Image (tube, rainbow, N blue to C red):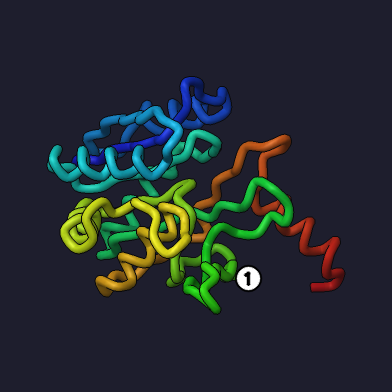
């Protein structure tokens, strides 16, 4: 199993991200051949297209997309890969917006409403389960390379923004159009680095403040 762990990034990497990364890749699971890829640049969609092209041309099996402002557990790679072993092509870990309101970056609906790009956060989401979604951000997502190849063949550069959406949601729309299903495993949790690390505990506390008793 040939897996690329890929991060679009700036010139410097956050210490918490680096510590998480080393903890995850220092002991890969049996049968996994891991290669890191960092693509520096200010245009995230261009970096993601470069990663996709290299994954396809390099005959990788899977890509674990992790942004440079995330923290994650050592078993994240193994657990996401196990979900693809079950026959899936796209599985996101549970992540939240860095800025308030700290909504989950998974969506129950994506579309254009009255000429306005619209994404509806999946709330409430199933806790500690795997479930189908309409799309997600790419803070921590594993995709099969066969999915990347299908989107590349069908749409050209698969992460180039379209319809007013960002590069990540654009890719999700392409997946949907090609008939691929997307999932989130909410038992695989990652943190979003900000002034504090935004994770499920922060989200739950915010919900209790805004909607006591829910």
On the image, numbered disc 1 is attached to which residue?
A: 123
- Residue at 86 percent of width and 69 percent of height: 212
User: Could you say whether the residue bearing mark 1 is in a helix, strand or loop?
Assistant: loop
Tell me the residue at 43%/72% (across/down): 132
Q: Is residue 101 left or right of residue 137?
A: right
Q: Is residue 1 visible?
A: no
Residue 85, x across and y down, in percent: 26, 58
Q: Is residue 153 above or below residue 197?
A: below
Q: Residue furthest bottom?
A: 114
Count neighbours of disc 1 (C-alpha within 10 A) and say few if under 14, some if 14 to 19, many if 20 or more. Answer: few
In the image, farthest residue toward the front: 115
Q: Quadrant of the N terminus?
A: top left
**x%, y% of residue 198?**
67, 45
Viewer-closest of 111 and 205: 111
Q: Quadrant of residue 66?
A: top left
Image spot of residue 117 (x, y percent): 52, 67
Query: 178 or 140: nearer the eye?
Result: 178
Residue 188 is left or right of residue 84, and the answer is: right
Q: Residue at x 54, y 50 (%)?
A: 189
Residue drawn at point x = 72 percent, y = 56 percent: 101
């Amino acid at each position: 199993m040939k897996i690329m762990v890929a991060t679009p990034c700036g010139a410097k990497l956050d210490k918490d991200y680096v510590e998480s990364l080393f903890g995850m890749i220092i002991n890969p699971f049996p049968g996994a051949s891991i290669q890191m890829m960092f693509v520096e640049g200010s245009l995230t969609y261009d970096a993601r297209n470069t990663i996709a092209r290299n994954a396809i041309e390099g005959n990788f099996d899977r890509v674990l997309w992790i942004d440079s402002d995330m923290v994650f557990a050592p078993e994240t790679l193994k657990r996401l890969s196990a979900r693809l072993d079950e026959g899936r092509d796209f599985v996101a870990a549970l992540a939240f917006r860095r800025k308030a309101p700290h909504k989950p970056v998974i969506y129950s609906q994506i579309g254009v409403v009255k000429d306005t790009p619209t994404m509806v956060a999946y709330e409430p989401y199933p806790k500690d389960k795997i479930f189908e979604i309409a799309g997600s951000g790419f803070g921590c997502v594993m995709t099969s390379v066969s999915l990347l190849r299908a989107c590349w063949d069908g749409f050209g550069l698969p992460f180039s923004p379209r319809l007013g959406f960002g590069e990540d949601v654009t890719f999700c729309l392409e997946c949907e159009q090609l008939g691929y299903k997307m999932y989130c495993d909410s038992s695989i949790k990652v943190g979003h680095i900000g002034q504090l690390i935004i994770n499920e505990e922060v989200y739950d506390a915010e919900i209790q403040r805004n909607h006591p008793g829910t």
